Image: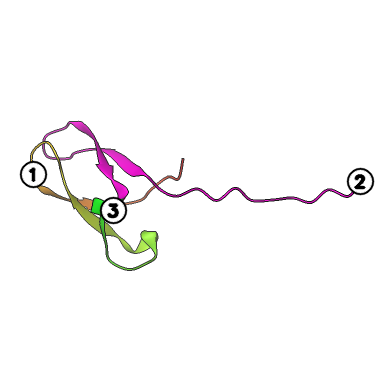
Amino acid sequence: MNKTDYTIISEPDHISFECPFCKEDVDVPFEDVNFNTDYWGDGAQVNCPECGKEVELGDYEYD
């Protein structure tokens, strides 16, 4: 039997971070993130759901 490698494609659901203003750990739905371009590495902003301040997002990990 011949086998082949494959890729499981997953859709981002949400992001998690510690707000630099209120220090709360928060989750934000992925569709609420304002990416600068279609490439996630080009930066993004999102409003903290706890304190409402705009947070600039830096480097990311895909989990």
Q: Main secondary structure of the magenta part?
A: loop
Q: Amino acid at mark 1?
A: Gly
Question: According to the image, label 1 marks what residue?
Answer: 52
**Mark 1 → mark 3, Cα distance in angstroms:** 17 Å
Specify start and end residues of the magenta stretch as a single range.
Answer: 1-30
**Mark 1 → mark 2, Cα distance in angstroms:** 56 Å
Q: Tally the numbered discs.
A: 3
Q: Residue at x 37, y 59 (%)?
A: 40
| Residue 62 shows in the view | yes
Question: Measured along the vertical axis of the image, is residue 35 above or below residue 23?
Answer: below
Q: Is residue 23 magenta?
A: yes
Q: Is residue 58 magenta?
A: no
Q: Which mark is residue 31?
A: 3
Question: According to the image, label 2 marks what residue?
Answer: 1
User: Are the residues at dot 1 and dot 3 in contact (C-beta closer than 8 Å)?
Assistant: no
Estimate how packed mark 2 is, as few (under 14), some (14 to 19) or many (20 or more) residues with alpha carbons within 10 Å.
Answer: few
